[in-house]
Image (tube, rainbow, N blue to C red):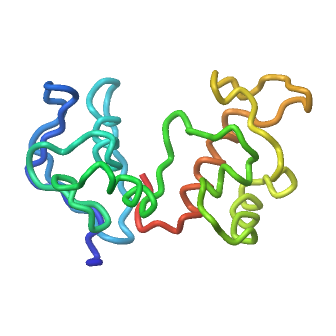
């Protein structure tokens, strides 16, 4: 892989048949940090969805971690998502333990998971279940009391992205 991990040239992003963003030119090299800001409805989420394969790039050129966003097939998307760390706006936690949420379906070394969760303050709570995932109410009182808060859910999502040791986190 070259030191460029994300490249877009004259890219146009669509939602259905409507242009959301156009003439995007961007190159991100390994080790760079950037953030995208904008008002509600300006295309930030559509941009991110294009990067992880939820929206097809239909115009222009684009690649991320050596995946061509224009020619990528639907069955390539899971392989792309294994190479990038994604922190979703709504966390996308599973109805399983905190530890299993960080693993995200990947086989991994439990010591690594403990390391990331320890840094986030969860090492003593690996087997806790996030409550209220389906309704995004993380402070529900369950049989075990409050399991995790919204902020803690965000930390778990970030720990999952870091755990993959991906060349890019979005």
Q: Residue furthest right?
A: 144
Horizontal arrangement in the rendering, residue 163 relative to residue 64 (left or right)? right
Say which of 82 and 123 sits in front: 82
Please provide percent x and percent y for residue 87.
50, 47
Splitting the image into 4 quarters, where does residue 143 fall?
Answer: top right
Q: Residue at x 42, y 68 (%)?
A: 167
Estimate the x, y position of residue 18 in percent, counting from the top left. Answer: 14, 25
**Quarter of the image containing the N terminus?**
bottom left
| Residue 113 in the figure: left or right of residue 126 | left
Up/down of 138 relative to 68, above or below: above
**Residue 44: % across, % down:** 32, 36
Can you give x and y, in whole percent of width and height, for residue 161 in the image? 54, 56
Of 87 and 53, the residue lying toward us: 53
Left or right: 159 in relation to 143: left
Residue at 45% across, 60% down: 82
* 48, 132: nearer the viewer: 132
């Amino acid at each position: 892989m070259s030191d460029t991990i994300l490249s877009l040239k004259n890219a146009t992003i669509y939602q259905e048949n409507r242009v959301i963003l156009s003439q995007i030119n961007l190159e991100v090299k390994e080790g760079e940090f950037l953030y995208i800001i904008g008002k509600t409805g300006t295309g930030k989420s559509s941009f991110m969805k294009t990067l992880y394969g939820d929206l097809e790039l239909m115009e222009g050129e684009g690649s991320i971690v050596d995946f061509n966003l224009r020619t990528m097939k639907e069955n390539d998307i899971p392989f792309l998502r294994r190479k990038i760390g994604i922190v979703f706006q709504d966390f996308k936690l599973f109805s399983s333990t905190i530890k299993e949420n960080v693993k995200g379906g990947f086989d991994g070394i439990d010591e690594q998971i403990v390391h990331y969760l320890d840094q986030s303050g969860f090492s003593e709570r690996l087997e806790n279940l996030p409550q209220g995932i389906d309704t995004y109410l993380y402070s529900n009182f369950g049989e075990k009391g409050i399991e995790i808060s919204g902020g803690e859910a965000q930390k778990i999502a970030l720990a999952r992205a870091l755990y993959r040791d991906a060349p890019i986190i979005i």
